[in-house]
Amino acid sequence: MAGEAQTRELTVDLGERSYPIMIGTGLLARTGSLFSERGFPVKSPILLVTDRAVEDLYAGTVEQSLREAGYTVARAVVASGEKSKSLDVFEELVTAALETGLDRRSTVIALGGGVVGDLAGFVAAAYMRGVRFVQMPTTILAHDSSVGGKVAVNHRLAKNIIGAFHQPEFVLYDLDTLASLPPREVRAGYAEVVKHGLIWDEAFVKWCDENAERLLALEPDALGYALHEGCRVKSIVVSRDERENDLRAILNLGHTIGHALEAVAGYGELLHGEAIAIGMVGSARLAARFGYGDELAAETERLLRKFELPVRIPSGFDTDEIMAAMQHDKKFKEGQMVFVVPKRVGEVEIRSDVPAQWVRDIVEQLKGEAGKL
Amino acid sequence: MAGEAQTRELTVDLGERSYPIMIGTGLLARTGSLFSERGFPVKSPILLVTDRAVEDLYAGTVEQSLREAGYTVARAVVASGEKSKSLDVFEELVTAALETGLDRRSTVIALGGGVVGDLAGFVAAAYMRGVRFVQMPTTILAHDSSVGGKVAVNHRLAKNIIGAFHQPEFVLYDLDTLASLPPREVRAGYAEVVKHGLIWDEAFVKWCDENAERLLALEPDALGYALHEGCRVKSIVVSRDERENDLRAILNLGHTIGHALEAVAGYGELLHGEAIAIGMVGSARLAARFGYGDELAAETERLLRKFELPVRIPSGFDTDEIMAAMQHDKKFKEGQMVFVVPKRVGEVEIRSDVPAQWVRDIVEQLKGEAGKL
């Protein structure tokens, strides 16, 4: 990625717990001054949680900036990948927090992708029943997970089943960190960007469609705009329904099938963005069954293909296993399958009257057409 | 314990999250109808968490009552004692919750003392980022821990260090369950009852003083009144400061020294109530150093002796270990020792200017006089 982008800022409006998201270039080096300006206490040590892939590239910049501002910071590094989202690694981080002497006014920083954010966020939520938390996402996908306060670790039987709602103090999104992303992760990241358009904002979907090439090339200003818009939609939804009583569930477009595919593949085999891209095509086909027309599925598919995302279930997947995995989903309420179904581009609805047979048919279709991928 | 007591009810006032505490006899058998009246969904399974000591005595009554009202309930039994407040046992309970099919509208019930309440409460707080929680305390001590929403498990380096604020839907306090308490636990339980008087309500302290014999004999009406008053003080304080930003810290009277003694003794050797009884004597001696007079310590000691509680540190304890354990306390902020110090009976203040040497002197005194216990 070459060049600079303007710094964009928006606010997640949650009353007392409102917080800003800053998106731009060269931001990590400003960490220390941001901590000072916001009154983070200098005497309380900070724990910087990151993973092996990110550590060498960016941890030093953050630490140096904090130390120059007078803060004490210790680094805790976890293995890259979904396997670190476990209770065992969580316990190791709590040990690190205790050994570093973190107190109630301390801060846990998550520097990394969604795995690091979810894991470090749960440490911040549970350590001493909650300390300050700062998100520094380093992937495109994490524009989604870093906003909204959902943090969690996995259990061997189910993903994200142990967690909390714990909002960060701020989100610092340094676009420079995205330059090091593998191309497959860039593509997968755009799945959640597109999702935010599909559930809320037709104009943004159109913009994504027109700017797909610039986005895949990581042009700073296009990237900054896309992440700002994705975060904006996310923050509007979260502001209106922090605890997912109703509206927030629309963010799960593509996730019922997507999570099941991830579980069956073994976490990490299929990237999260890839799984939900396939799931969004599945949801659009459900829409057709509910009478919202066939074009929606075709249009969703065309857009996702433009971002070089998968739109079919790989043929090796077992339909029964996929269906069984959906039963363990948190979105499964009182014996009913719950799906987010698009009505048109930019609007969705939550349906709890989806016959399991429709879902099974669509899973079979998406597998059967896998050859045409 | 013979006879019945009137059912007393009070409300913990936390806006949307307000909840009732019901104290009386014969309440466990009414669990099912209480769940129905309060609209707990019949389709969502319930997990009843209890321990070996309580299981045989009371779990059947609760389960039968729930089943008669149409609910599905599974039982998860943990070993009695502080060792069950671990991440390992927490994980076992999450496994049980998943295997029972608990969904987002499900309820976790804690039937037992403080250990079961803290542990099951953290399961309720973290499972799917939070499900309903009901407290059914079966000890006197748990009148304190079951109110206010603090839930947690221990880490090998520190007690209650992994947890959440998660308020119950209601607290059901069946006095019949207290009849099976060992006398030592009865006495230890009254330490927290007396504490609630000492921090807030001089008249209640006087009442405790005059009714100590009836209380030690578990006379139902005296017991019901004492627990009601203890819960009332706790709920007033929690209502005004749920997250322990300031006022709530007064509930920690006696806990800085008390927790350290528990940690040094090895959890479970010294009962929690016994440890904080000693701690409250220590705090009253600190008060003398701050110029609040020597009578406070003598009076605190006399009252606690009336409840047959220890008021000296057993001579085998190492002073350096006790001092070191205090450094790991959550109440240790930014390098300062924080203590709750009584000003007079019924009023305390929070002091963060306590010289470590004063604390060390008092610990030494309380050890040196151990022979006079």
Image: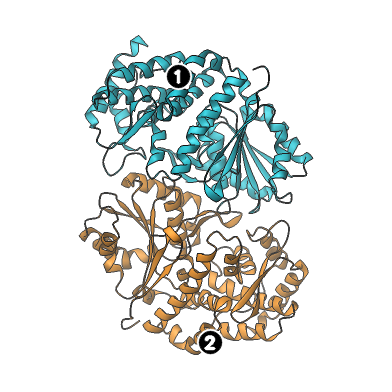
Chain colours: A cyan, B orange
Q: Amino acid at mark 1?
A: Lys
Instruction: Say which residue appears at 48% left-offset and 33% top-offset.
Output: A233
The chain containing the residue under callout 2 comes to B
Where disc 2 sits, the SS reads: helix
Residue A306, given in percent of the width and then of the height, sits at 45, 13
Q: Which mark is residue B206?
A: 2
Image quarter (top left, top right, bottom left or bottom right) of the N terminus of chain B: bottom left
Residue B278, given in percent of the width and then of the height, sits at 61, 75
Q: Nearer the viewer, residue B20 or B63?
A: B20
Where disc 1 sits, the SS reads: helix
Q: Is residue A168 above or below residue A112?
A: below
Q: Residues within 10 Å of mark 1 (few under 14, many from 20)?
A: some
Q: Which mark is residue A206?
A: 1
Q: Amino acid at mark 2?
A: Lys
Q: Is residue A81 visible?
A: no
Q: Nearer the viewer, residue B51 or A31?
A: A31
Q: Please tell me whether mark 1 or mark 2 is closer to you in this view.
A: 1
Instruction: Say which residue appears at 22% left-offset and 28% top-offset.
Output: A357
- Residue most extreme to the bottom: B210
The chain containing the residue under callout 1 comes to A
Image quarter (top left, top right, bottom left or bottom right) of the C terminus of chain B: bottom right
